[in-house]
């Protein structure tokens, strides 16, 4: 499963609900302006429940776009550290869009949303659709004799792609493959041959 990073421009968007992100593979960085001294107690309490998933970053200095530059710098560092992750900027400021389009051109998964609720809705829908897709792949594999199942990572991923009618490189293919590994339905030996436990 890909790691997700959410970078919130708190000068621009204050209405944020973090409860749906607890325990998920999301890391949140909330950027607050140098002059922002009041944060709602409810938000602080909810953020404490996320433990190491969340970081508050109060920027140094003031001025037009000061926070934007801090957020952009952090986004660049995260992309360099974890280029296969998904990045979400929460802001109403369209000034981020040029950078986001550049990252997309470089095949980095990045988007801007004005409301964090759009991400939490996608999480719920994504979890449901991933689970449905995983179950469909499991049923298909169970129907195939064990000795005729895909033997390598590449052939199994092609099998998943073809069965679900996905495009090459769709992240769902890798997510299902990783779920098969983590649930110990498959394992890979030293010769990189897949062994099925069902």
Image (spheres, rainbow, N blue to C red):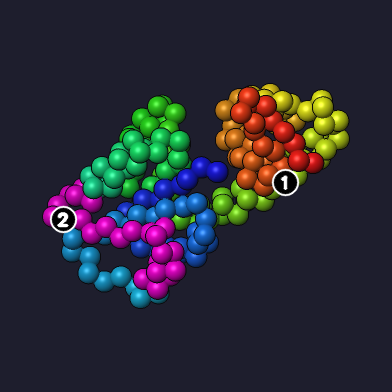
The number of discs equals 2
Task: Locate residue 39 relative to residue 37 in the image: left or right.
Answer: right
Image quadrant for the N terminus? top right
Disc 1 or 2, which lies upstream in sequence?
2
* Residue pictured at 45% horizontal, 36% vertical: 84
* Residue pictured at 34% horizontal, 42% vertical: 78
Pick the front one: 67 or 184: 184
Task: Locate residue 44 relative to residue 49 in the image: left or right.
Answer: left
Q: Judge whether residue 86 can be spotted in this image.
A: yes
> In the structure shown, which secondary structural element does the residue marked by tag 1 occupy?
helix
**Residue sitting farthest toward the front:** 190
Pick the front one: 98 or 109: 109
Q: Which residue is mark 2?
A: 60
**Residue sitting farthest toward the bottom:** 41
Image quadrant for the C terminus? top right
Residue 153 spot, x, y in % from top left:
64, 28
Q: Residues within 10 Å of mark 1 (few under 14, many from 20)?
A: few
Q: Is residue 53 found inside the magenta-colored segment of the image?
A: yes
> In the structure shown, which secondary structural element does the residue marked by tag 2 occupy?
loop
Q: Which residue is mark 1?
A: 132
Number of the label disc, if any, that sits on residue 66:
none
* Residue pictured at 36% horizontal, 30% vertical: 102
Residue 167 image-quadrant placement: top right
* Residue pictured at 86% horizontal, 30% vertical: 145
Residue range highlighted in magenta:
43-67
Residue 152 spot, x, y in % from top left:
67, 25
Q: Is residue 189 found inside the magenta-colored segment of the image?
A: no
Q: Judge whether residue 11 can be spotted in this image.
A: no
Residue 29 spot, x, y in % from top left:
35, 54
Instruction: Give the Cα distance between marks 1 and 2.
Output: 46 Å
Residue 110 spot, x, y in % from top left:
43, 39
From what the image shows, is residue 3 above or below residue 102? below
């Amino acid at each position: 499963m890909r790691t997700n990073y959410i970078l919130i421009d708190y000068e621009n968007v204050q209405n944020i609900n973090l409860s749906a992100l607890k325990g998920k593979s999301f890391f949140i960085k909330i950027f607050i302006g140098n002059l922002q001294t009041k944060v709602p107690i409810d938000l602080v309490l909810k953020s404490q429940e996320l433990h190491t998933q969340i970081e508050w970053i109060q920027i140094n200095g003031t001025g037009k776009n000061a926070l934007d530059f801090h957020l952009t710098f952090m986004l660049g560092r995260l992309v360099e550290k974890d280029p296969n992750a998904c990045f979400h900027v929460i802001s109403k400021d369209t000034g981020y869009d040029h950078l986001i389009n550049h990252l997309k051109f470089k095949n980095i998964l990045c988007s801007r949303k004005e409301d964090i609720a759009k991400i939490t809705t996608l999480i719920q829908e994504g979890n449901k659709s991933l689970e449905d897709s995983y179950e469909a792949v499991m049923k298909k594999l169970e129907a195939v004799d064990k000795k005729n199942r895909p033997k390598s990572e590449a052939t199994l991923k092609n099998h998943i792609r073809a069965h679900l009618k996905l495009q090459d490189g769709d992240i769902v293919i890798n997510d299902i493959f990783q779920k098969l590994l983590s649930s110990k339905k498959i394992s890979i030996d030293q010769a990189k041959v897949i062994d099925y436990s069902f």
